[in-house]
Amino acid sequence: MEKKLTGIVVSLKPYGADFMITLITAEEGLVNVLVENEPNFFKFAKELLTFGYFTVKVKGSFFCVLQKCEVIDTFLKIKNSSIKFTEAKNLCGVVKEVAQLNDKDTPLFMEFCESLKALNYKDLPSNLVLTKFLSTIFVGFSKSLDFKTCDVCGQALKNFYFLNFSNCTFVCQNCQEKLSRPLSKQTLAALKQVIATNYDDIETLINLSYKNLLVFLIEIFKFKVGERFKFYSE
């Protein structure tokens, strides 16, 4: 059986004489695809970040064999910049981990597309796109995104903010527990601003101080998916 998938290559590795690529797809989440190592065929399918339509033949439950690749974008500007490429590889790693938790997550695929477009076509500071992407993942992890009241007692949050890592909700100082971490007002303000800004307007965040926010979002992400995950920039 053949099927056509809209996807982006998020990882690849040798598989005998051929290649095994992993796609994040709009239709089916993560899909493993065998690409036969013919020198004159499927060149871009064997490259990280290739975005296109992939016609595959289903082979068992775990992978498919590539029949055709129609390229939409290769994100060449990312690949020509070592800094952008490192950031893109981190994005690929994050999206792979999250996709394993949510099968057929089309919004995740669309968010990933927007992040790569911003990284490729906009002149942005290092890791700003990664910060934006992780903020969206954080929203997905959160049971209730309420910046004003404590998730436990319902009291107004004024001077001290703590984040419960288990369900990514905000609690007051009295309700903090072992899995809670303090959050400065500056980092909280940056988080609100990044969440509220879409990729089309991401240039408005250029002057934002987001380094501490990125560290915090990485800590949350690792807690949720496991400390085994390592970012390329670490």
Image (cartoon, helix red, strand yellow):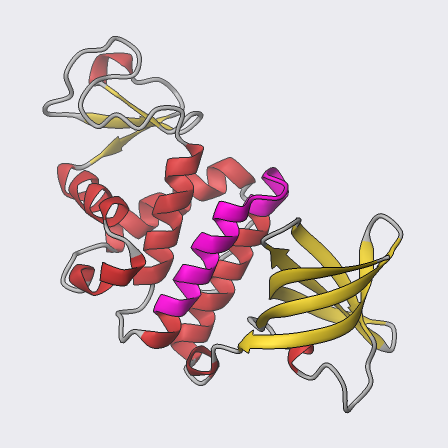
Q: Residue at x 71, y 55 (%)?
A: 31
Q: Main secondary structure of the magenta part?
A: helix
The reply to whether the magenta stretch includes residue 65 is no
Location of residue 50 in the rendering, given as x and y in whole percent from the top left corner: 58, 73
Q: Residue furthest left?
A: 159
Quarter that holds the C terminus = bottom left
Location of residue 7 in the rendering, given as x and y in whole percent from the top left corner: 61, 62
Whether residue 119 is visible to the viewer of this picture, yes or no, is yes
Location of residue 81 in the rendering, given as x and y in whole percent from the top left corner: 41, 82
Quarter that holds the N terminus = bottom right
**Magenta extent:** 98-118
Residues 167 and 211: in front is 167
Location of residue 106 in the rendering, given as x and y in whole percent from the top left corner: 54, 47
Q: Is residue 144 above or below residue 22?
A: above
Q: Is residue 183 above or below residue 193?
A: above
Q: Residue at x 76, y 85 (%)?
A: 41
Q: Residue at x 59, y 39 (%)?
A: 102
The reply to whether the magenta stretch includes residue 113 is yes
Whether residue 228 is visible to the viewer of this picture, yes or no, is no
Left or right: 32 in relation to 119: right
Residues 42 and 170: in front is 42
